[in-house]
Image (tube, rainbow, N blue to C red):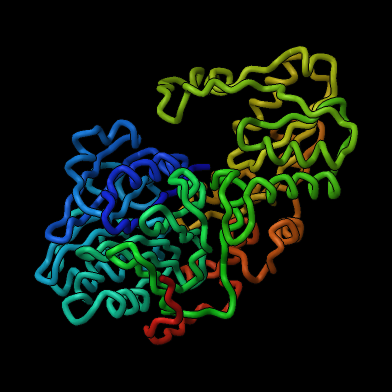
């Protein structure tokens, strides 16, 4: 399972935006580690610095000093569509006769190819195979005929899929959330202005205050002088399609997404897991770090079962660790995690994680605990079984690679070597989120999607009504 992208946009009036954008990207680093970038505008021209690598490696003080202006956008990327190289790093910039444009995108379009083909036939030349450049070119084309709000409205009528966007057009910053609200985006107040970002933790980092989530289908325009913002409801659907995996895995526990604190949701998912499939063992332990809040809620609901850290994580082994041989790949889990023998030796253990994707890591973890002397290892998962791929911007493997795609829970239990295995039900997830199932994207756990995806089943009417572009609210 991999993180997705993080976006931020800011307008600060008479304060320089570069450093706050930099700090916000640090707060969003968990959402993408492949590339980072910032685009600013000083009222006369656009400035940008985009490169491969972590935020702390991409920018130095000279880079930030060169990013003049009080408005800007930023991006951290984990690639789920497009190449893993600098051509797809964001924000994506376009200069054209109506001005300059920068775009940062979190999500994944499902009709990229058809829109790219249409634009290419009209003479647009593309430098990458990513969907962000497609959005940028379509926006630039629409800007030739009208203003930014109207251009975004037209582009939203063309593109389909999940997206949270921050856009800078000359000295104006806007944030846009797709009509289903699949990807998170929120609005905050900071000293001297306003900020739009994927997660509220970035607003906290800037000593700001969360105002609210951007609504599905809404565009929020930040005033260039930092004095306020205007809201435009560009599209409207009967139901949203919030990605429940944001709460299960992707978002920081200290973020508030769609009005719920991620940490509390995870604890509640853990409590529900105990209610549905609790098993009496000597100790409950998380797979660090993703299983920690689930395990805390599970142990609390179990009332009396010891919660302990039984696996210690080496934080210096990342995805880029070189594994040239099969033996090295199998050893990787032992480099990342080491058992505390006194916690597990001679004891029955419940091991709690957020998901099982391919099953390889779970198999190694069960074996690790048995080698450390656990007498029983019971696996509990704080989410439903993943049976289908995600098309909405999460790198979640193909059906052929998903262990639960064509296996029963008992078969998976046998494959990973656990004494028992249980997943959380979909209804429990909806209850924990206090959200109707019809307002969640559950494609990866049901095989039915809230979008019209070729070869897949939709779980709702996927036509896209488009409303007007008059402002619906204003804040000073």
Residue plotted at (23% across, 73% down) = 118
Please tell me in which quadrant of the rendered image residue 358 appears: top right
Q: Position of residue 308 (x, y in %)?
A: 76, 25
353 or 324: which is nearer to us?
Answer: 353
Q: Is residue 389 above or below residue 321?
A: below
Q: Nearer the viewer, residue 41 or 404?
A: 41
Residue drawn at x 40%, y 67% as measured from the top left? 176
Residue 129 visible to the viewer: no
Instruction: Looking at the picture, tell me which residue is in the foreground, 286 or 198.
Output: 198
* Res 333 quadrant in image: top right
- Quarter residue 85 falls in: top left
Taking the spot 53% from the left edge, 63% from the top edge, the residue there is 212
Q: Is residue 332 above or below residue 58?
A: above
Residue 70 in picture, x, y percent from top left: 26, 54
In this rendering, is residue 403 above or below 168? above
Q: Position of residue 133 (x, y in %)?
A: 26, 60
Q: Residue at x 23, y 33 (%)?
A: 61
């Amino acid at each position: 399972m991999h993180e997705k992208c993080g976006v931020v946009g800011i307008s600060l009036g008479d304060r320089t935006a570069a450093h706050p954008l930099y700090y916000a990207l640090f707060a969003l680093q968990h959402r993408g580690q492949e590339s980072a970038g910032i685009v600013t505008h000083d009222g006369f021209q656009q400035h940008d610095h985009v490169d491969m690598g972590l935020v702390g490696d991409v920018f130095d003080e000279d880079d930030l000093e060169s990013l003049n202006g009080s408005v800007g956008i930023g991006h951290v990327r984990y690639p789920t569509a497009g190449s893993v190289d600098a051509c797809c790093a964001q924000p994506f910039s376009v200069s054209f006769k109506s001005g300059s444009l920068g775009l940062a995108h979190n999500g994944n379009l499902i009709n990229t190819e058809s829109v790219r083909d249409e634009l290419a036939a009209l003479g647009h030349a593309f430098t990458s195979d990513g969907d962000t450049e497609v959005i940028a070119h379509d926006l630039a084309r629409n800007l030739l005929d009208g203003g930014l709000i109207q251009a975004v409205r037209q582009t939203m009528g063309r593109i389909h899929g999940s997206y949270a966007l921050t856009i800078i057009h000359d000295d104006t910053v806007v944030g846009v959330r797709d009509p289903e609200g699949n990807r998170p985006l929120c609005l905050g107040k900071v000293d001297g202005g306003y900020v739009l970002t994927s997660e509220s933790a970035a607003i906290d980092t800037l000593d700001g205050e969360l105002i609210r989530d951007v609504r599905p289908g809404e565009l929020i325009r930040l005033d260039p002088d930092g004095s306020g913002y205007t809201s435009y409801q560009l599209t409207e659907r009967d139901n949203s399609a919030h990605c429940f995996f944001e709460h299960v895995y992707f978002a920081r526990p200290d973020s508030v997404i769609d009005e719920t604190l991620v940490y509390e949701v995870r604890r509640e998912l853990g409590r529900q897991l105990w209610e549905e499939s609790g098993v009496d063992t000597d100790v409950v332990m998380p797979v660090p770090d993703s299983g920690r809040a689930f395990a805390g809620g599970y142990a609390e609901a179990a009332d009396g079962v010891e919660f302990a850290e039984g696996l210690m994580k080496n934080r210096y082994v990342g995805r880029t660790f070189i594994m040239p041989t099969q033996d090295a790949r199998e050893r990787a889990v032992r480099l990342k995690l080491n058992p505390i023998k006194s916690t597990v030796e001679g004891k029955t253990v419940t091991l709690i994680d957020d998901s099982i994707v391919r099953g390889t890591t779970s198999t190694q973890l069960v074996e690790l605990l048995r080698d450390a002397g656990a007498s029983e290892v019971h696996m509990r998962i704080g989410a439903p079984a993943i049976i289908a791929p995600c098309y909405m911007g999460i790198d979640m493997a193909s059906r052929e690679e998903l262990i639960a795609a064509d296996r029963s829970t008992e078969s998976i239990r046998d494959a990973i070597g656990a004494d028992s295995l249980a997943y959380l039900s979909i209804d429990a997830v909806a209850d924990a989120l206090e959200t109707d199932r019809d307002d969640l994207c559950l494609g990866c756990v049901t095989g039915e999607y809230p979008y019209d995806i070729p070869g897949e089943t939709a779980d709702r009417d996927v036509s896209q009504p488009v409303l007007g572009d008059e402002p619906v609210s204003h804040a000073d």
